Image (spheres, rainbow, N blue to C red):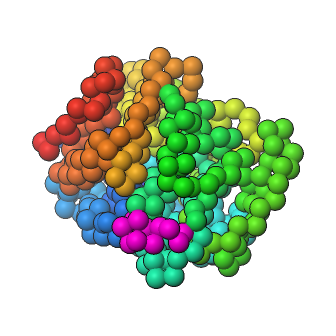
Amino acid sequence: MARVAVLGAGLGGVIMAYELKDQLGREHEVIAINKGTSYSFVPSNPWVAVGWRDKESIEVDLTSVFAKRDIKLHAQGAERVHPAENRVDLIGGGSVDYDYLVIATGPELAFDEIEGFGPEGFTNSICHVDHALRAKAAFDQLVKKPGPVIIGAAQGASCYGPAYEFTFVLDKALRDAKVRDKVPMTFVTAEPYIGHLGLDGVGDTKGLLESEMRQHHVKWICNAKVDKFEAGMAHVSELNDDGSLKAKHDLPFAYSMLLPAFRGVKAVYGTEGLTNPRGFILADKHQRNPNFGNVFSVGVCVAIPPLGKTPVPVGVPKTGFMIESMVTATARNIARLLDGKEPDAEATWNAVCLADFGDSGVAFVAQPQIPPRNVNWSSSGKWVHAAKIAFEKYFLRKIRIGKSEPFYERLALQALGIDKLKAIKIEEE
């Protein structure tokens, strides 16, 4: 019997544990290590931040579902990974030995890299549900006392869709509150142009998102490097394409939310042979670490080099489709190793994304995610908002019942006929 440990129980970690149970069967042990017993559906955090969802509606208690799936849960979290010793030290004492390890921790949020940044400083966040709840309290104050708003993504960020989503979700919430006319909004981003998304654009995301910005009266600053935040003030350097200074901006705000850069979590950060200098896990095309052959990784914690040089550092996102395909490949490769074979499964690095704008949205398909592409498509409409709600319900139900079905792969098959995307019905079963 082999012991397979999964470090992390987020989007990648939970379905990783489920799929390992499906692939490996009862004769092998699957162990999950996570801080806490709850799974939270992060894509719903923009809705939490304006009061359209509460914490309970987007969380799942993993205790019972893991027990039903015969997955052992260590809820104290990991203190340190020792890949050379096949061991994970747990917070508070104790350890877990493993035959195979899948790292699915997600990132650490690098707010400390910019002075005054983050929930402990002067800005809000939607990266965690507890952050989103604090952002909701700040939103309530904004409604009571309207003023300028700054939304966006700081230098080094590798997740841009939620910044665009929250811009338009906040716009809709302020319109509903009848105070949007009193709230000037500015989008501040490290991207070289609107709609870059860390992917050099997908289809006409540049045109679509610029149009949405204009229609919703949102100004923007690209190639933006945030120097520091103070109470009610952001200091931003706007760079030219050659990296020289174009302009300095002192932006007053009554409310701000910018996404931070990511780095690897402390449990793995700085482990020689396991991580790159930012603490992300090194992986080959089979999701396998090149130095520790029994260690795999999936999700945001995986090291992916930037798409190309930009004036301000811009990272590559790990989308839901990419993460699910990493999970499927990893489960199959571990199963092959247990059968005495070499890994052969590779993740399909495609992007199929639904970006909700409160009452409309933008969808895009990139196959593969990194150009040049076979499919490079984007579209907008009210159907995207409805599809995002359906996806939330579907995915949370999948987590609650312990199902590992790769939803994004089904969506990608539909994308072979792009026009059919609008007609997709998310199954409840």
Q: Does residue 163 sit above or below 118 in this rendering?
A: above
Give the residue furthest to the left: 429
Q: Which of the two residues, 386 or 210, is positioned nearer the viewer here?
A: 210
Q: From this viewpoint, is residue 109 visible?
A: no
Coordinates of residue 38 in the picture (x, y in percent) = 32, 64
Query: Magenta segment: does it hold 269?
Result: no
Displayed quadrant of residue 250: bottom right
Residue closer to the observer: 216 or 346:
216
Q: Nearer the viewer, residue 393 or 399?
A: 393
Quick one: quadrant of the C terminus? top left
Q: For the point 30% across and 66% down, which residue is it? A: 53
Bounds of the magenta segment: 173-183
Nearer the observer, 118 or 196: 196
Residue 112 relative to residue 426: left or right: right
User: Where does the image place residue 360, in percent across and percent down from the top left?
Assistant: 36, 47
Q: How many marks?
A: 0
**In screen coordinates, is 311 left or right of 90?**
right
Q: Position of residue 299 (x, y in %)?
A: 46, 43
Residue extending farthest front: 181
Q: Magenta span: helix, strand or loop, mainly?
A: helix
Residue at 52% x, 77% y is 146
Point 21% across, 44% down: residue: 403
Give the residue drawn at x 69%, y 47%.
Answer: 222
Compared across the picture, whether 422 is left or right of 153 comes to left
The x and y percentages for residue 7 are 43, 52
On the rendered image, what quadrant is the N terminus found in?
top left
